[in-house]
Amino acid sequence: MSLLDYFKVVRDVPQEELEIPLFPLKSVLFPGGNLALKVFEKRYLDMCADCLKNEKPFGICLILKGEETGVPATPYSVGTLAHVSSWDMEQLGILQLGVRGGRRFRILETRTEADGLQRARVLLLGEPAAVPVPVAQEGLLPILQKVAADLGPEKMPLPHPWDDAAWVGYRLTEVMPVQLLAKQKLLELDDAVSRLEILFKYLAQRGLVK
């Protein structure tokens, strides 16, 4: 399924609950985005093996309190489903993983297993119907188009639906040099146009768009 088809599918999908393992990180994954992970803790190696075997996603959440390794961290309540897109283990015990962002979710409750892996009951969040980039924010497009050209299709896969405000907002937020908390807040926004307005204001204040 292409990214464009994926975005068409998730629009207006009814909210539903799901139980998933969590992978709290100091990173924010966005719907339709790619993220490279280096996995070496046993709890997460076992989690990835199970997800690969059963073709199931896990959840990536930004860490609110704690660290990526050791004692289970406290995650923010909104995260994104991570679907494994590639994997490799050139060195025994170290898994190089590529994941693609799926639907956003909100954590309803969590539990921690004996090995420290957190599992959560989550509510999958629907995406609003696709809307075009408003004229007032069209100045964002040349910036993202240049970034996409620089990154190449491996890091920002085709197709590039430039007329989809949600897709444009997610991709811009991924590459913006802003604090992780700011990215988290933009992930949590349901309104794609509001996300673009915030991004445009940020770049306008720095003289990068008019």
Image (tube, rainbow, N blue to C red):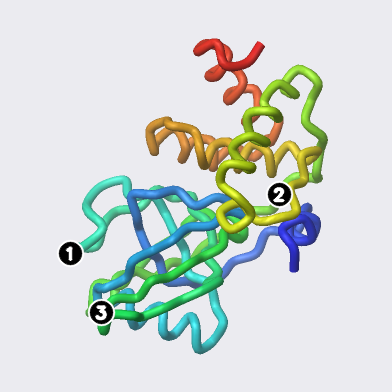
User: Residue 8: percent from the left, percent from the top?
Assistant: 80, 56
Q: Which disc number belongs to residue 70?
A: 1
Looking at the rendered structure, the number of numbered marks drawn on it comes to 3
Residue displayed at 65% across by 64% down: 16
Secondary structure state at the residue bearing disc 1: loop
Residue displayed at 57% across by 42% down: 150
User: Residue 114: percent from the left, percent from the top?
Assistant: 23, 79
User: Residue 168: percent from the left, percent from the top?
Assistant: 68, 38
Label 3 sits on what residue type?
A: Lys
- Dot 3 crowding, Cα within 10 Å, few <14, some 14–19, many 20+: some
Placement of 165 over or under 2, stated as above or below: above
Q: Is residue 79 left or right of residue 104?
A: left
- Dot 2 crowding, Cα within 10 Å, few <14, some 14–19, many 20+: many
Q: Is residue 184 left or right of residue 1?
A: left
Q: Which residue is mark 2?
A: 127
Secondary structure state at the residue bearing disc 2: loop
